[in-house]
Structure formats: C-alpha cells, structure tokens
Amino acid sequence: MYAGLSGVIWIEYLWKHRRKKMNVVHAMIGAVICPVLFGGVMELCQQYFTNYRSGDWIDFWANTAGVVTAAWIAWFILKPWIVRK
C-alpha cells in the first residue's frame, strides 16, 4: 500500500516538474519522509488507541520498504521516461 501511495506522489511530482528543474529535497520530503512518518503514526495509533489492533515494527519496516521501492522505481525508471515526453 505504501509503495502505491508513494508511487502516486512520485508520478504527480515528476509529471508536474517534467519541464522544470526538479528539487530533490521537495520530492524526498513529499514522497518519502511523509509516507514513512504516516506509517509510523498509524502503527502508534494502532498500538495505543485501539483494543483490537497492535503496532508492529515489522509492519513499519514493510511500509518503509514499500516507500523506498517506489522511490527507486520512480527515480530510475519513471523519471527518464516522463522527462522525455
């Protein structure tokens, strides 16, 4: 799910900035840091605000792996393809 979330953010960012110089810091904040923080907050909410769910470090690392995978795919595969269009 987090690969999909991050991937959609990457596609939108790359598409909107295909003719301009891309600011990598803005892309990393919006498409990497924010989804990772969101995943962490969701795990904490599951642990402390529900009786039927538990927060899990493995889920957090899986979410982070999805975000990192989407970032690699976007930067090395989608970016060259979108910039050419």
Image: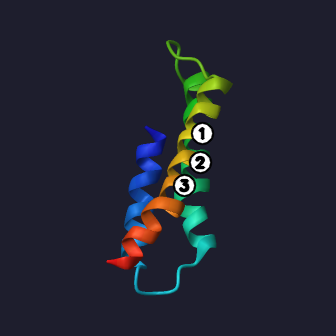
Q: Which of 48 and 7 is in front in this view?
A: 7
58 shown above or below 19: above
Q: In which quarter of the image is residue 8?
A: bottom left
In terms of secondary structure, where does tag 1 sit?
helix
Amino acid at dot 2: Val
> Which residue bears the numbered disc 3?
71
Q: Tag 3: residue type?
A: Ala
The residue tagged 1 is 65
Q: For the C terminus, which image quadrant?
A: bottom left
Up/down of 82 relative to 53, above or below: below
* Residue on which the image places disc 2: 68
- Local crowd size for mark 1, using a 10 Å CA cut-off: few (<14), some (14–19), many (≥20): some
Q: Where is residue 59 in the image (x, y as percent from the top left)?
A: 59, 27
Please, which residue is most extreme toward the right here? 57
Look at the numbered discs 1 and 2 and tell me whether their residues touch, using CB distance below 8 Å.
yes
Instruction: Residue at 62% x, 38% y: name it.
Output: 40
What is the distance, in whole Å, between disc 3 and disc 2 at their CAs? Answer: 5 Å
Q: Where is residue 70 in the image (x, y as percent from the top left)?
A: 50, 50
Question: Do the CB atoms of the residues marked 3 and 2 lie less than 8 Å apart?
Answer: yes
Precedes in sequence: disc 3 or disc 1: 1
Residue at the farthest left position: 85
Would you call the spot at circle 2 few (<14 residues within 10 Å), some (14-19), or many (20 or more)? many
